[in-house]
Structures are given as structure tokens and as C-alpha cells.
Image (spheres, rainbow, N blue to C red):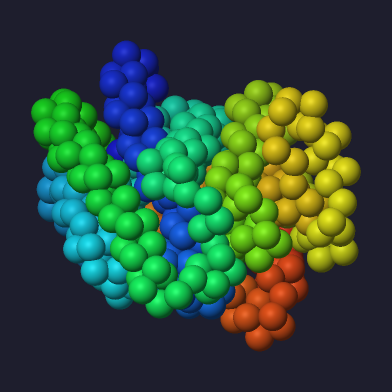
Amino acid sequence: METAVLSQNEPRSSLLPMAIIGMLFFIFGFVTWLNGSLIPFLKVLCDLNEFQALFVTFAFYIAYTVMALPMSYILRKTGYRDGMAIGLAIMGVAALVFIPAAQTGSYPIFLLALFGLGAGLTILQTASNPYVVKVGPPESAATRIAIMGIINKGAGVLAPIVFTALVLSGLVDFNTESISRLGEVERVARLEEVSGRLVMPYVYMAVLLFLLVALVKFSGLPDIEEEESKDSETKSGILQFPQVVLGALALFTYVGVEVIAGDTIGLYGERLGLANYASLTSYTMVFMVIGYLIGVVGIPRYISQQQALLGSAVAGSLCVIGVLSGSSESTAIASVLWGWSGIPVVPDTVTFVALMGLAHALCWPAIWPLALEGLGRFTAQGSALLIMGIAGGAIVPLVFGKVAHFADNTQVGYWVALPCYLFILFYALKGHRMRSWS
């Protein structure tokens, strides 16, 4: 399958593809950031510790590594439109697997369903990200990806709110401490009742995904020609492009810290005894949307893609220092930032976790165009390699969970994010410029 590159003298032709891709980015965001609510929920439901609970992210994100190359092969054989339809169908089937998982309360079946969702998303991501990069001028690629990011993270804001409304509505004190105080019979009955609330939301999700299969299949999404480059003419394999190999590592570290910021904030809130722990992912997502808006306005008018990545790495490092050194009792920062709005405030350390979303929002839209530059006929392979970097969302949070569990202190786990931001800093300063390993 040829890599998607739209002719810049055909602006009308890009409108429908971008609308379709925007719709898919919404699906990416909703399904992905639902994990932030599922993690503390399943921790209570299945009686897990922090390390065990973060296998939610492992099962979901490891699918990107396991399935990236097979899915890129499928994409080459089927084309973008049919490949995206296959990805949506896989996700629809995976959503249905949540039904027996909820009925039995089986954590392994939940993990199987999450792996299936990740597998379906792999083919969608492999197709859509290079498509957005190539749909217009290369210097504004980060802006286009930032627009997609706003859609993606906007869905991430909605997902925890919808989950809380559909699953946790009316529940009082559904947390580890309150469940542990119940007698055995009462505890089992309570867990069965709460687990059953998951069934209908995932039925709705499956129906929606199968409807989208039909929409994408008959959308008329075009397959378009690939561009060549001088670099690609002299290279024999994707591993000869340092900018994309290091870019995949940068995405590995970025996705790792993105998942930590979005998916562990609920765990941290539950550990601190916050009543709204299941919806805390929305705080991180709101800040990420703000970061993407900054990217849309600022790139390339005021800052370059490389400068945006550099700023993200520095700001992210400062946020980690804030999490580690801040107060878990004071709510002063949140009171200043949004206390006036009526939105519940959170402790300063939790606020810094949420602010990590703002700090690193522009990493994804900046890394993709920097890494794909000059790949030519290797762009499809480069995209698959970058997608494999999403495995950072599987590995890095598990390291976080192990550190937090070993220290019996979730706050200490955030040390794991610091070396990740430092590698992103290296890629922004030097890694993206490398065109040979010598």
C-alpha cells in the first residue's frame, strides 16, 4: 500500500479525508482515555494493587508493539479505507468481550478485551497519523496533528465523565477501604452489582463501532501516491534512518509519561482518598487540549516543531519535580487556576500531574513530522515503527506501578517520568537531525 500524500493543489480533496480522520481520532481518544477510569475501578472491583492494576495499560498498549507490523502488512494489502474498517471491526468485537468480563468479574478477560481494543486501534493509528502529516505543507504538519489532538483529547475529557455517569452514578464510597469493611456476602453482592453496570456501556460502544465500519467502508476515502526523497533512494531499510529510530524511542518515552499523567492520576487520587478519583483523568485531558490549542496557534507562526518539542521536555521535567516536592494536602495551585470556576480542586501534587498534560501536549504532533521527514518510500515502515513506540504506554506505567507498590507511595512513582522527559529533550536538541549513525 502506498503512503498517503495528498496533492497540495487539490484542497477540496483533503476535506473529506480530514473529517474522517478527525472522527477516528475522537474514537482513539475516547477508547484510550477510558483506561484512566477503568484502572482505579478495576483495582477496587478485582482487588488489585497498583502494579497489578496497571496491567490495564500494559494489555492495551502492548498490542501496538505486537500488532504494528502485521497491521501495516494488512494496510498495504487492503488500502486505507478497508484497513480502517477492519480496525473498527476488531474494536467492535473487543468491546463485546467486556460483557463476559463484567459478568464474571474476571481480570484476565478484561485484559483480553483491552488487548483487542489496542489491536484494532493499531491499524487505525498506522493509517491516520502519516495521512495527517502528508495532507499539507510539512512545516505545518504539527499544527494539523495538533488539531487532531484537540479532537482526541476532547474525547479524553468526555470519557471519564461518561464512565462516571453510566457506571458510578449513585454509588457512595466505592473504594478499596470501604469495600474491605464489608462482610463477605455483602462484598460479593456489591461487586456483582457494580460490575454489571459495565455491560450496557460496552454494548453501546460495540454498536457504534460497527456502524462506523459501514461509514468508513463507503466513505470514498482516497488512496493517494507516495513521494520519493533523495535519502530514501540511498537507504535499504528503515533502521538506516536514525531520525525515525530515535523518534520511535522518543514516542516510547512520551507515550509512557502521557499514560502516567492521564491514567495514574486516578490511582493517586484514590490513594489520597479523593471522592472524584474516577474523573481525574479529565483534568489531565483538559490541560492537554489547552496545549494542543497553543500548538494550533503557535506552530509554525511563532515557534517551530523542534522548539515546541524542546519546550515540552523542559516543562514536563519541571512538573515532575513539582509532583515529587509539592504538598498532597494544600490545594493552593488548583484554587488559583480553576477554584473560581466551581470545578472541584485537588491537592497541589495532583495538580502537577494534571499539568504534565499541558507540558507534553505538543510532543506527539512534533515528533511525527520530525521523524518521518525524508523517508520517502519507507514512510509506511517508519509509521509502523513509530506506532510500535506506543508500547511505552505499556512498559513505563508498569515501572511506575512497581516503584509505587515497592515504596508503598504512589507519589514516589513519578520519578519514573523524569528520564523519559530527558530523552525527549535529547531528541529535540540532536536526535531528530541525525541522518546517519556514523
Q: Residue furthest top?
A: 12
- Residue 339: give x, y in percent of width and height: 79, 32
Tell me if residue 136 comes above or below residue 77 in the rendering. Answer: above
Q: Position of residue 129 (x, y in %)?
A: 40, 43
Q: Residue at x 70, y 38 (%)?
A: 344
The reply to whether residue 324 is in sight is: yes
The residue nearer to you, when weighing 99 against 403, is 99
Asked whether 211 or 242 is in front, the reply is: 211
Quarter containing the C terminus: bottom right
- Please determine whether, in this image, residue 435 is positioned above or below residue 180: above
Q: Using residue 168 as the reference point, say whether residue 86 is left or right of it.
A: left
Occupied quadrant, residue 335: top right
At a point 63% along the width and 42% down the height, the residue shown is: 283
Residue nearest the viewer, comparing 14 with 49:
49
- Give me the residue at 55% from left, 46% from top: 279
Give x and y (percent) for residue 70.
22, 65
Q: Is residue 91 visible?
A: no
| Rendered position, 179 above or below 206 | below
Q: Quarter of the image holding residue 235?
A: bottom left
Residue at position x 81%, y 65% from top? 324
- Residue 420 placed where, x, y %? 66, 66
Q: Nearer the viewer, residue 32 or 176?
A: 176
Total tally of numbered discs in the picture: 0
